[in-house]
Amino acid sequence: MQSVLFVCTANICRSAYAEILLQWLVPSLDVRSAGVYALRGTPMDEPMKGEVERRGIPAPDKRGHQLRPSDVAEADLILVMDENHREFLLQEYPRSLKKVGLLGAIDTLVPIVGTGDVLRTSHVAAWARQPARAEDAIEDPYRKPREVVERVAATLTQKVEVLADLIAPLEHSDLVGPDGRAL
């Protein structure tokens, strides 16, 4: 696994958060994010940026990036936030079928990888064929109340940590939650 692409709608909340977090957890990995209808050049949503910083992670000047064919072609794994994003990718880029999955369903990839192995493109291909479940969608926190932003950030953190452990098993003890305790 060399590269991961996170995709959401505007690329200023969910996918941007996931990109920053995974890049911090696995610095050797090529991590990118994009939006299917990106707010191009718009800075990361302040509440989500604040959630990154509350976890002790420096938040770079991340700006909305429109999904391009090269983003899809270069990624080994593409993780979307809901079924609409997945359908968009499969319609626009049918060859991406074996590498697109819902980030919210990342836990179902764990048994496919198995114990003692690391994530490979063959694992992703087997996993990507699984049907999406509505409960695996990650809500868009844009312009939502603080509790929603915090809940989405906590969900993204948990899911990205699972992914990081599949790619490069590490200890992430220096990551802290909104309450100041280690995650």
Image (cartoon, rainbow, N blue to C red):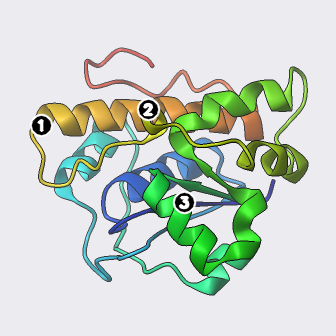
The residue located at (41%, 59%) in the rendering is 16
Tell me, yes or no, whether the two marked residues, 1 and 3, touch with CB atoms within 8 Å.
no
Of helix, strand and loop, which one carries label 3?
A: helix
- Mark drawn on residue 146: 1
Query: Which mark is first along the chain, 3 or 1?
Result: 3
Of helix, strand and loop, which one carries label 1?
A: helix
Tell me, yes or no, whether the two marked residues, 2 and 1, touch with CB atoms within 8 Å.
no
Q: Amino acid at mark 1?
A: Arg
Residue marked by disc 2: 135
Q: Nearer the viewer, mark 1 or mark 3?
A: 3
Q: Kindly tell me whether residue 74 is visible in this rendering.
A: no
Which percent across, then down, holds residue 95?
76, 74
Question: Considering only vertical position in the picture, is 22 above or below 42?
Answer: above
Which percent across, then down, holds residue 170?
70, 29
The residue located at (53%, 34%) in the rendering is 159
User: Is residue 178 left or right of 23 when viewed as pictured?
Assistant: left
Q: Amino acid at mark 2?
A: Glu
Q: Amino acid at mark 3?
A: Arg
The residue located at (70%, 74%) in the rendering is 94
- Give the CA separation, mark 3 to mark 2: 14 Å
Residue marked by disc 3: 86
Crowding at dot 1, Cα within 10 Å, few <14 / some 14-19 / many 20+, comes out as few
Which percent across, then down, holds residue 26?
65, 46
Question: Considering only vertical position in the picture, is 58 above or below 173?
Answer: below
Which quadrant holds residue 157? top left
How many labels, in total?
3
Of helix, strand and loop, which one carries label 2?
A: helix
Query: Which mark is first along the chain, 2 or 3?
Result: 3
The residue located at (72%, 33%) in the rendering is 109
